[in-house]
Amino acid sequence: MRFGKTLRESMYPPWKDQYIDYSKLKAMLREDKREDEDVPWTEEDENRFCDEVFNVQLEKVAQFQEKTVSSLKERAEVAFEKLKEMAPSDDKPKSDITTARLKELKAELDAITNEVKELKKYSSANYTGFLKIAKKHDRKRGDRYKVRPMMRVSLSERGFNSEQAYSPLLNKLSLMYYAINQNLDEGEQQHPMDLDLESQQEVHNGERYTAHKFWIHTDNLLEVKTAILRHLPSLVYTQQAGKEPDGNEDPKITSLYFDNSKFELYGRKVDRQVDASSLRLRWYGQLDSKSDIVLEQKIVHENGISEEKKFPIKNKYIKAFIDGEYKMEKTIAKMERQGQSAEAIESFKTTVSELQDFIIKHKLEPVLRANYTRTAFQKPSDDRVRISIDTDIAFIREDTLDRDRPCRDPQEWHRRDIDNGNMTYPFKNINQSEVSRFPYALLEIKLKEEGGRKRPRWVEDLMVSHLVHAAPRFSKFVHGVASLFEDYVNQLPLWLSDLETDIRKDPQTAHDEEEQRKAQQAEDAMVVGSFLGGGAATKIGSYKPATSSPVGKSYLSERAAKDARDAMASIPPTAVNGNGEQNVEEDGTSQQRSYGTLSSVFPGFSLSKYSRAKRQRAQLPEGVTKPEVWLKNAGPLQVEPKVWLANERTFLKWQHICILLGTLAISLYTAAGENFLAECMGIAYIVIAIMAGGWGYAMLHRRRDMIVERSGKDFDNMVGPLAVSAALMLALILNFVFSYRAAFARLDADSRLLNETEAAFVGELL
C-alpha cells in the first residue's frame, strides 16, 4: 500500500488538519508529473521545498504534538488531584467515597488514555511521513543536496516517535487505574491499555519472567560486563546444543525471520496488536557445522505476556516443511520408538501443525537474517536472574521480493553465499545495501517472578545507571525490517529517533534524574496506598534518597566529569559572543595563541589565518546557526586509556634524556681533574639535564589538564625540544671552540720552547 493512502486511513478526524501535508510535498517534488521530468530542479525549487518541509510542515506538527502532550499532562494532573481529594483520611472514611465519583473519574482516565493512543499513532504516522518525503527528495532531487540526514536529526531533537515522552504520563495513569479499580471492587480487572512501557512479561516452560531491554554504548560495554561479572558468572554455550557450557569463545547466533511480501507480521508487531507474532529459525555458530536448528514462534497476547512455541528441525527438512510437504513424520516416529509419553507426542504434533498452518496461511518466507555474538550470565542451576549481552549485531536481507535480483535463491530457504562462505561480522563480502549494522550492544535482563521476592539490588542499580539506555520495546525483527525494508513498510518503530542521539549520560546527571523519578513515583504511590489501606501506603510509597551514583563509580570518570563541569562553570560570559564565536583582538588574531604549535614559535609560519579566513568564507544556510558547543564536547567525558599512557610515555622519554645527560655531565665533571674547561662543560650539561627533566614534568601536567578540559589545541610542543637541542648544540660548539683555542695555545707554547732550545744549542756551539 502506498504511504499516502496509509496516512489518509490512519488520520484521527479531529486532528486531520494537523498532519503532514504529504500530497503537497510530493507535488513540490513533481513526483507524479511525467511532463515535468525535463524541467530542471533549480535553487529556488530547493529553497521552496526545504522551507515548506522544515519551517512549515515540521513546525506545525511539532507544535501541535507539544501542545497536545502538555494538555494531556495537565488533564492527568487534574485527575490525580481529584483522586487525592477522594483519598480516605481520619475525618473522611473510605466508605464515604462514592462509586459514582470514581466511575466519573475513570471515564476521564479512559478519555485521556484513548487520546494518548491516538497521539502515538499521530506521532508515528508523521514521523514516517517526514522520513519518506526526505528519502524521495534525496532519490529524485538529491544531486546537490541531501536533506534526509538533517531531517533525522531534526526529528530526534523534536522528540518525535519516542517512547520516553509517554512513559511518565502512562505510569501515572496506570497507578490511578489501579487505585480506582480496587475501590470499585473489580479485583484483577485488566487495564484498557498496556500501560507498562518499562518491561515485558514472558512465559518459558510455564514460568513467568519479566524482561528488561537496554542499549549499551561501546564505550560503556566493558564496564557493564565487569559490573555483571561481580555477581554472575559468564556462561558460554556450545555451538551444537546451545545448552551446555564449555570453554569456547562467545557463540555467534543467527536468527532467520519470516514474513510475507506485505510485511503483515511486522505491521502487527509495530502496532502492538493482539496476538502479534514473530517466526524465526535460530542456530548457533556456522550452519555447515551441523548446528541444531530450532523453529520458534513468539506470540504477544492481549495482556502483554509473550509465549513461545518451538521445536528442533534438521537442515534438509526445512524447505519441505515451509512448503507444507513434510510434517515432521520422521521425528514423530522416532519419539514413538523411544517410548515417549502420548502427551509429549501429541503436544509435539500440535506445535508442528500450528506453526506449519501459520506459515502456509500467511504465505511466510525468510526475509531477514540477524547475526550477533551473545555473552550470557547466569548462575548454574539458578535461573532467577538471566542476563545476556548481544554485540556485533548485523541485519541482512534474505528476501526474494525483487524477482529479477533476489537476495536469496527462491529454491533455497537461506542464503548460500553467506553460509557456504562462512561469512562473519561485519559481512564485507556482500552488497552493503543489503546489510545494516546496529551501532550499540543489546542488554536483556530476565527476572523470574516469585511471590513477594524483590529483585536484587545490584540489578536495579544497573538498570537505572548511566551505563545503559532503556529500550523496553526493542525488537531485532522490527528494527531489521525498518532499517532494510523502509520502502516496503508504512510504519516505523518508536526507538529509531533515539539512534540519532548520543545515549551516553553524565553519571551524576543520570543519578539525579533517577532519584527525582523515584521520588515522584513514591509520592504518586502514596495516594494509591491510601486507597488500599493498612500498611500499603507505607510499603508502596517508601523511598529513601541515595547519596551517590551506585554503578559505574570510578575515580577517572568522576574526576573527569567534575573537572569538565567546573571548567564550563568557570568560563566568563564574555568569553563567547552571541554567535557562539570566541572574541578576537582588533588585529584579527586570537587572544590566545595555539599552545605548542609552530605558530607559537615562528608566528610567520602560522596557518591559522588561512584556515580562519577559509571558515569565514563558508556561509551557513539560512536558519542554521553556528553551534555554541561542539559535538565532540557534548555528553560525559570519555578518555581512552591509551591517551593517558601516551602522555606518560612521553614524560618517561624526557626523563630518559635527563638521566643520560646527567650521567654524561657527572662523568665529565668527575674525570675533569684540574681541567677547568671540562668542569665548566660538566656543569653546563647538568643544567641542560635539569632543564629536560623539568620540561618533561611540566608538559605531563599541562597535557593532562588539556585532556580533561577537552581542549581543541594541539598537543605537540616544539619549544622544549628546540630549547634542549639548541642548548646542547651551543654547549658542543663552545666546547669545540674552547678546546680548539687551548690546543693552539699549547702548540704555540711548544713552538716557542723549541725555538728557545734551538737558540741555546746554537749559542753553545758558537
Image (cartoon, grey):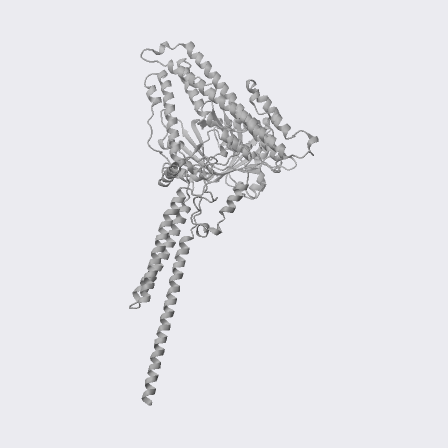
- Residue 606 in percent (x, y) is at 48, 49
Between residue 662 and residue 544, name the one nearer to us. 662
Across and down, in percent, residue 119 comes to: 51, 22
Left/right placement of residue 650 relative to residue 363 reads: left
Looking at the figure, which quarter contains the N terminus? Answer: top right
Furthest toward the right, the residue is 35
Does the image show residue 292?
no
Which residue is at the front of the view, 435 or 372? 435
Asked where in the image residue 542 lies, by quadrant, the reply is top left
**Horizontally, is 377 left or right of 668 in the view?**
right
Residue at horizontal 33 percent and vertical 59 percent from the top: 686
> Which image quarter: residue 288?
top right
Q: Position of residue 132 (x, y in %)?
A: 58, 30
Tell me: residue 432, above or below residue 34.
Answer: below
Asked whether residue 583 is in view, the answer is: yes
Residue furthest to the front:
586
Q: Up-down: is 236 above or below 186?
A: below
The residue most toward the bottom is: 766
**Residue located farthest toward the left when viewing the structure as drawn:** 674
Give the number of callouts. 0
x, y (%) of residue 485? 58, 33
Q: Is residue 339 left or right of residue 320?
A: left
**Image point 68% across, 33% down: which residue?**
39
- The C terminus is located in which quarter? bottom left
Residue positioned 41% across, 33% down in the render: 386
Identify which residue, 352 or 524, lies in the foreground.
524
User: 169 or 428: which is nearer to us?
Assistant: 169
